[in-house]
């Protein structure tokens, strides 16, 4: 910059720099010394510096957990903070109990209500809201891509997560050697979109109390004009899927006697059959494959010669499908409904030849509602006809009984040992808890239809399912 008064500009700059080193007392509860921050402005062709107020971002969330006479505190980090101050409410005012905490966790002997203030050399942030109590164990229940794991260059991907016991979380996005971080503000269940210009790795890191942290990763590939496939390495162990050149979704692999069923990231379902020749090892031959409209997120099941599976499309709508195992014919699907399907369907069948003991276990009791049970992410439960996959008239919900989204495939308990007083039920695992849920009866399912109100394919207002018991693993 050229000034008409170069000597004056130099003196002004020296004066500002001298003032920049001057400290003053801020009349806060902690009476801490801070430096004055300045910002340059241009006035009449001369650069000068004016004093400004500069504080770090506030702490978004403070979590506390009391145990053994102590209170553990943990909070979301403030990016500009050099240290933190801990304040405790004494019934009338907020008192400083720790003035220079450089980590994002602290242990206090005793209990009470706390606040954490982010500070740096120029001042402290406005104090955050009162603390939130956290009791769940730290866990990443789900971290997933809402859509395909391979995308076009320059497109966006939407990542979703489900956490418990978290006090802070962040997602780092690595592509082309560049790392960017996104601070997660909704710590239970949410999603966020990222722009992808190259093969990317997303790392979700979740923190709890006393510095405890866990992480997991997701890889997203970009589609190439001339794709290539990196060959795997053959080991000394049996690898039936080796050399197939398929991008298999590991959690969808079903191996049932001489059947092998799985899905791939490019949206296909495969069926392989085992072949055995004398004095030769078993080999697997592909029988068929079908293209999918969405993604299969869990292990399919085989019942009465059909493969049953749940499918979720890019609009986060889920449906149940079946296809004949021997020849991939007779593919039938239910209508799409709002909400993703991460769990596979289960088959409740009162009269199939595969379930004679199931039928016998219902002897002398009210008949259970048969069909294909689909358990949606939001806790909705729908029953479909096993043959046509048309919806039954009555739908159900577990939303009020579950504290987390439904991501695990339930288990059908048949009580084949005829344990007295124990009903047939559906077992649902939620982290380290198990719920026993009563199977609806045919009377309940047909009530809506008996009044002649619902047309075929319509479903009535969802009724809550009955939870028989809860247990801890």
Image (cartoon, rainbow, N blue to C red):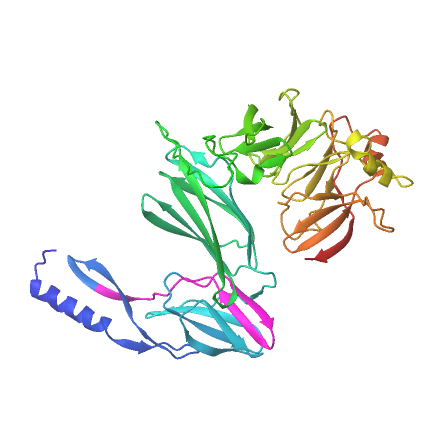
- Who's the residue at 47% across and 66% down the image? 211
**Magenta span contains residue 308:** no
Residue 130 position in % (x across, y down): 54, 67
- Front residue (pair 215, 413): 413
- The residue segment tinted magenta is 49-78
Q: Which quadrant of the rendered structure holds the N terminus?
A: bottom left
Residue 291, visible in the rendered structure: no
- Residue 55 in picture, x, y percent from top left: 37, 65
Question: What residue is drawn where x is 19% and y is 59%?
Answer: 43
Q: Judge left or right: residue 286 versus residue 201.
A: right
Front residue of 227 and 96 = 227
Residue in front for this viewpoint, 430 or 393: 430
Is residue 152 toward the left or the right of residue 345 in the image? left
Quarter occupied by residue 292: top right
Point out the residue furthest to the right here.
364
Could you say where residue 330 lies in the image, as x and y percent from the top left? 66, 20
Q: Quadrant of the C terminus?
A: bottom right
Splitting the image into 4 quarters, where does residue 78 fall? bottom left
Q: Is residue 77 magenta?
A: yes
**Residue extending furthest front?**
279
- What residue lies at 37% left-to-right and 78% top-to-bottom? 32
Residue nearer the viewer, 212 or 234: 234
Residue 315, image quadrant = top right
Q: Position of residue 281 (x, y in %)?
A: 55, 32
């Amino acid at each position: 910059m050229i000034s008409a008064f170069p000597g004056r500009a130099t003196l002004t700059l020296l004066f500002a720099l001298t003032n920049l080193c001057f400290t003053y007392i801020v009349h806060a509860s902690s009476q801490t010394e801070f430096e004055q921050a300045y910002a340059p402005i241009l006035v009449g062709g001369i650069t000068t510096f004016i004093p400004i107020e500069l504080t770090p971002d506030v702490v978004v969330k403070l979590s506390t957990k009391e145990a053994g006479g102590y209170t553990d505190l943990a909070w979301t980090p403030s990016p500009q903070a050099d240290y933190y101050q801990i304040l405790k409410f004494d019934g009338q005012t907020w008192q400083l109990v720790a003035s220079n905490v450089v980590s994002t966790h602290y242990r206090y002997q005793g209990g009470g209500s706390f606040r954490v203030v982010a500070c740096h050399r120029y001042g402290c942030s406005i104090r955050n809201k009162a603390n939130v109590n956290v009791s769940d164990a730290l866990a990443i229940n789900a971290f997933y891509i809402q859509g395909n794991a391979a995308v076009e260059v320059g497109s966006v991907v939407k990542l979703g997560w489900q956490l418990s016991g978290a006090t802070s979380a962040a997602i780092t996005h690595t592509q082309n050697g560049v790392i960017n971080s996104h601070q997660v503000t909704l710590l239970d269940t949410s999603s966020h979109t990222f722009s992808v210009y190259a093969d990317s790795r997303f790392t979700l890191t979740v923190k709890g109390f006393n510095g405890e942290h866990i992480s997991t990763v997701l890889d997203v590939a970009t589609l190439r004009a001339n794709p290539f496939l990196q060959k795997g390495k053959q080991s000394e162990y049996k690898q039936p899927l080796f050399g197939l050149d398929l991008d298999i979704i590991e959690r969808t692999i079903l191996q049932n006697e001489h059947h092998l069923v799985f899905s791939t990231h490019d949206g296909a379902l495969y069926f392989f059959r085992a072949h055995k020749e004398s004095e030769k090892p078993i080999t697997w031959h592909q029988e068929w494959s079908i293209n999918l409209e969405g993604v299969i997120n869990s292990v399919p099941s085989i019942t009465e010669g059909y493969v049953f599976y749940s499918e979720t499309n890019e609009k986060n709508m889920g449906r149940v499908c079946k296809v004949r195992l021997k020849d991939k014919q007779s593919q039938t699907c239910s209508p799409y409904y709002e909400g993703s399907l991460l769990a596979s369907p289960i088959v409740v069948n009162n009269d199939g030849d595969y379930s004679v003991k199931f039928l016998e276990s219902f002897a002398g009791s009210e008949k259970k509602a048969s069909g294909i049970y689909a358990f949606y992410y939001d806790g909705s439960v729908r029953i479909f006809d096993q043959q046509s996959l048309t919806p039954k008239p009555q739908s159900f919900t577990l939303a009020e009984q579950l504290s987390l989204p439904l991501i695990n495939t339930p288990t059908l308990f048949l009580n084949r040992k005829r344990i007295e007083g124990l009903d047939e039920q559906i077992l649902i695992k939620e982290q380290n808890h198990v719920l026993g849920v009563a199977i609806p009866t045919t009377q309940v399912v047909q009530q809506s239809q008996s009044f002649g109100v619902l047309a075929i394919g319509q479903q009535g207002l969802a009724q809550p399912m009955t939870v028989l018991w809860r247990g801890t693993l």
